[in-house]
């Protein structure tokens, strides 16, 4: 009988569901069920959601991190890196959502803890941890022109990606370029890492161009995800196009087709002809060094045929080293009469770049990045469209053929 009584006790203590023993144990299981039901009724109705989900990796660094609540309000949200560094964030006015204030870091593990209350004041908790995408598994596009800049009518939108893009169509769909002029804009892939976008003809003067990068989460190649979400705008200035004629050795500067100034020049010599074609100004330097060795002009000792450390008023036209620049070392008589350079377009100037009365000073001061210089009658080939920002040397049909969408 003692053994039987002990066994019965064990049964009572271990029971989790109703059985024939309920009558013998005085309703213990029924009491437990009632207690569970009562505890459930006392739980908060607030439902907290943390994104990215707990355990996620390759999370976006832009806008994926968030905490939201339904049937309640958030009372506390903390976000820290794995080493305990706090991440500042902002709670919405109605206290139903929270987001970090700044872009997250790549290859970083973040921990989020959230607390919320329902209308009865009952508290709910939620915790999650996620890791952001690594540099090896993500890509960005470095773009020109800069946000807020004012550029010439020839400036394309040029994007250079830091990883090779194989899913070109997906990436291109994440890039939109529009203009207040209403011009159609088409993007062209020069390579797996460079895409330029432009209209059929030069931008309309005084228009505004908007570049939107919606690449966050876009797979550019297998296992390589975009992380950018950005909007950039720039202004197009007056319509200035300059025409260099190596035969007449004159440059005519025009505004909307009307000549505003004619400048004597000295282009590339017969042995070092200047490229022909439409070339866009990409950089300006009040003074810069030009060493022939950097562009393949060397003497028998391997040294540069020239090395001028203070070339005044230099404006870049190609990546390969073509400039319009001031020249103080040549005789004044060469400008307008003989082509003597190693391929650049030279203008009369003085040492120091401070003489406002020179042609070099005037042209530099009255030019902006994105202005166009058209060169003809040099006898050389047309500049390659990808040598600098010079896609205008490709006709519209060819340009559109390089689109992935």
Image (tube, grey):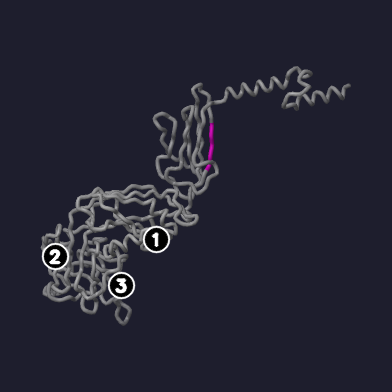
Q: In which quarter of the image is residue 166?
A: bottom left
Instruction: Check residue 252 in the rendering and tell me which mark sits there, or answer none.
Output: 2
Residue that numbered label 3 is attached to: 295
Label 3 secondary element: helix
Q: Taking 46 as reference, is 374 left or right?
A: left
The residue located at (36%, 63%) in the rendering is: 190
Of the numbered discs 1 and 3, the one sitting upstream in the chain is 1
Q: Report x, y in % for residue 87.
A: 45, 40
Is 381 drawn above or below residue 25 in the view shown? below
Secondary structure at badge 1 equals loop
Foreground residue among 71 and 320: 71
Is residue 369 visible in this depiction of the protein?
Answer: no
Q: Residues under labels 3 and 2: Cα distance?
A: 28 Å
Q: Which of marks 3 and 2 is nearer the N terminus?
A: 2
The range drawn in magenta is 125-129
Name the residue beneath numbered marker 1: 193
Q: Which residue is drawn at 53% across and 34% down?
A: 126
Q: Which of 68 and 306 is in front in this view?
A: 68
Determine if residue 25 is in view. yes
């Amino acid at each position: 009988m003692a053994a039987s009584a002990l066994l019965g006790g064990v049964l009572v203590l271990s029971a989790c569901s109703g059985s024939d023993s309920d009558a013998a144990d005085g309703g213990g299981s029924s009491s437990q069920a009632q207690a569970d039901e009562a505890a459930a009724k006392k739980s908060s109705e607030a439902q907290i959601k943390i994104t990215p989900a707990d355990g996620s990796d390759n999370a976006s660094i832009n806008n994926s991190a968030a905490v939201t609540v339904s049937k309640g309000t958030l009372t506390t949200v903390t976000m820290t890196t794995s080493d305990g560094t706090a991440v500042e964030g902002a709670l919405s006015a109605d206290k139903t959502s929270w987001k970090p204030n700044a872009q997250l870091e790549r290859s970083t593990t973040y921990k989020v803890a959230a607390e919320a209350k329902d209308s009865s004041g009952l508290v709910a908790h939620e915790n999650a941890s996620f890791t952001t995408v690594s540099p090896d598994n993500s890509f960005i596009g470095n773009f020109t022109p800069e946000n807020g800049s004012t550029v010439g009518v020839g400036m394309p939108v040029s994007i250079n990606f830091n990883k090779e893009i194989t899913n070109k169509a997906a990436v291109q769909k994440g890039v939109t370029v529009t203009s207040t002029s209403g011009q159609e804009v088409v993007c062209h892939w020069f390579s797996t890492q460079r895409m330029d976008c432009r209209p059929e003809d030069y931008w309309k003067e005084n228009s505004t161009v908007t570049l939107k990068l919606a690449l966050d989460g876009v797979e550019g190649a297998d296992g390589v995800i975009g992380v950018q979400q950005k909007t950039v705008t720039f202004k197009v200035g007056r319509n200035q196009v300059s025409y260099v004629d190596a035969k007449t050795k004159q440059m005519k500067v025009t505004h909307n087709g009307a000549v505003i100034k004619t400048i004597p020049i000295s282009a590339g010599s017969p042995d070092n002809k200047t490229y022909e074609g439409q070339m866009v100004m990409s950089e300006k330097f009040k003074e810069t060094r030009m060493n022939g060795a950097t562009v393949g002009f060397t003497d028998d000792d391997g040294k540069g045929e020239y090395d001028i450390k203070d070339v005044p008023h230099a404006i870049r036209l190609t990546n390969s080293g073509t400039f319009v620049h001031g020249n103080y070392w040549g005789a004044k008589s060469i400008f307008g009469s003989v082509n003597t350079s190693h391929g650049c377009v030279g203008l009369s100037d003085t040492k120091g770049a401070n003489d406002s009365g020179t042609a070099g000073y005037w042209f530099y001061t009255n030019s902006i990045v994105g202005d166009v210089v058209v060169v003809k009658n040099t006898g050389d080939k047309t500049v390659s469209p990808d040598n600098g920002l010079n896609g205008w040397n490709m006709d519209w049909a060819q340009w559109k053929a390089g689109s992935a969408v």
